[in-house]
Image (spheres, rainbow, N blue to C red):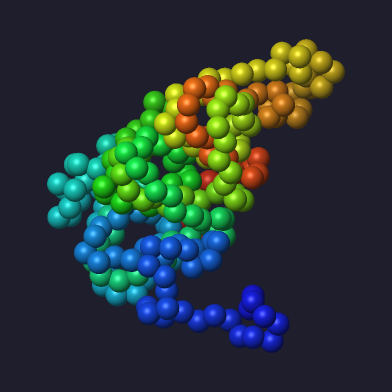
Amino acid sequence: MPANPGAGPVVHDPLTLPGDDNVDEYTFCVELKGNPWFLQKGKMIAYYGTVAFNGIGHGPLEPLVRGSFHSPLHASDWVVAEGSGKMLLADRAFDVNSYDLDEGNLTIRSGNLLAFQPSLTLKQSIVPGFLTLLGTGRFVAASNGPVVFMEPPLRVDPRALVGWADCPSPCHHYDHGYLSGVLGGLRALTGLGGASGEEHQLEFTGAGTVLLQSSEELLPERPVGGAPE
């Protein structure tokens, strides 16, 4: 929608698009100047210029992949984008933002990570469904609502968790008072209700930062690379 009533929509071209910055809260623009980026399949919505996409384990960029991508489980979900131009990234109208790591260690839910610079090293996390980024560089991630940054110690709803940086992996915490109460008893008898953040949390301790999305709804999954319905 236009910012001012009666004004037309903002129309971008290669000169007006920002470089390595947000176009709006839902779209991020990566500027390629011969510098490749790792990109999750299905997250590029348009590009200007000359851009080539090579699968992980295929094409001429094997030395780059060997140095920066260490997650065989997710290799088929990712490509390397290289060339010259500007590339727009988005994910089903979810919030999209970039973040900088400085000699950091960040573990993030695999579905939330959209792209990262090869100066970072991606590894397969020991925690199922998560990936770990190490080093210095920029990455782009999606979230269901704005991201808030919290300092441990704290307990979080697993569905609100985006990731954590420079702190130990969390452990599970179950509220036995809730489980043994009326609502927990009804759930045990009927199977209705499902687990909630009041019943089950992830507990973080030590130093570091925890990234939370401002929603308890995970980004819905769909086949990577598939077109939205």
> In the rendered view of the protein, which quadrant contains the N terminus?
bottom right
Percent of width and height locating residue 121: 28, 40
Q: Is residue 199 above or below residue 18?
A: above
Q: Is residue 127 above or below residue 216?
A: above
Front position in the image: 216 or 169: 169
The residue at the point 57 percent across, 20 percent down is 172
Q: Is residue 185 above or below residue 24?
A: above
Front position in the image: 73 or 201: 201
Q: Is residue 46 visible?
A: no
Q: Is residue 144 left or right of residue 98?
A: right
The residue at the point 30 percent across, 71 percent down is 85
Percent of width and height locating residue 37: 30, 55
The residue at the point 47 percent across, 63 percent down is 22
Q: Is residue 93 visible?
A: yes
Q: Is residue 159 above or below residue 17?
A: above
Percent of width and height locating residue 52: 25, 64
Q: Is residue 204 left or right of residue 74?
A: right
Percent of width and height locating residue 217: 64, 43
